[in-house]
Image: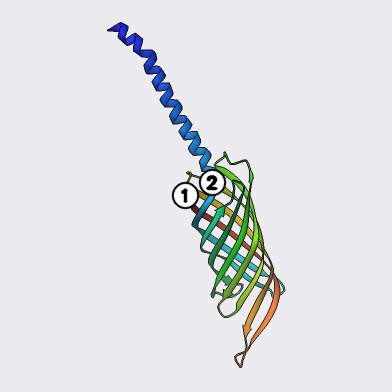
Amino acid sequence: MSRVLSRSKPRLLAAAAALLATFSASGLHAQSDAGSTKGLFFGLQYAGASVSVKEAAEDLKFGSGFGLHAGLGLSDNIAVLVNFDRSAVTRRGNSDDLTLKQYDALLRMYLLPGASSPVRVFATAGATGRAADRSTKFEGIAPTAGAGIHLGVTPHIAITGTALWTFGNLTRLDDITGGSTTKEDFKSTGTRVQVGASLYLFR
């Protein structure tokens, strides 16, 4: 009996080592896949935003809201996405909330450290359409740029944090007596933060 056990020990050890190596390889493969940004994805996010309209001495103070996004990772380094954010902001010196809606078309470039890492740093740029309304209306399309961090939790789920800045003219629309509207263009700076989750499909 002892001889049989002594002979089977090397086989058991070899089988255990092979099993451990298989699980380790599977875990490393899953971790590597978690860093991939290729494929179709969609998700939602918390969105906080504020806008400074300079010459008009207007500030749409920071307010929170939500957003939706969808995109396509063309490679492990480049993705395109469309985004919608809706936030409740207030005018300086006015307690009334305005609904600020922002529509983005963005290019995202993953810079470092690489596709094998679940944590990726990215830069993003594109165009944003903005509209806010209450007693005063603001609207316009302007360039946007920003940066963020992508965390691949699993091969199918990622969490992102992004900071965006939008620079450009914003048109203020004021209703006057007689049913007509005046339009004035003002330089503005918009600031936004997003924290969201994305689901990657077809992996």
Residue named by callout 1: 202
Q: Residue furthest left?
A: 1
Residue at 70% x, 76% y: name it.
Answer: 185
Quick one: quadrant of the N terminus?
A: top left
CA–CA distance in space, label 1 to label 2: 19 Å
Q: For the residue marked with disc 2, what is the amino acid?
A: Leu
Q: How busy is the neighbourhood of tag 1: few (under 14 within 10 Å), some, or many (20 plus)?
A: few
Instruction: State whether residue 25 is above or below residue 126.
Output: above
Q: In the rendered view, how is the structure colored? A: rainbow
Q: For the residue marked with disc 1, what is the amino acid?
A: Phe
Q: Earlier in the sequence, mark 1 or mark 2?
A: 2
Labels 1 & 2 near each other (Cβ < 8 A): no
> x, y (%) of residue 8?
34, 13
Q: In front: mark 1 or mark 2?
A: 1
Q: Secondary structure at mark 1?
A: loop
Q: Residue furthest top?
A: 3
Residue at 51% x, 54% y: name it.
Answer: 41
Residue at 62% x, 75% y: name it.
Answer: 138
Q: Nearer the viewer, residue 121 or 70?
A: 70
Q: How busy is the neighbourhood of tag 2: few (under 14 within 10 Å), some, or many (20 plus)?
A: some
> x, y (%) of residue 137?
60, 78
Residue named by callout 2: 151
Q: Residue furthest bottom?
A: 178
Q: Secondary structure at mark 2?
A: strand
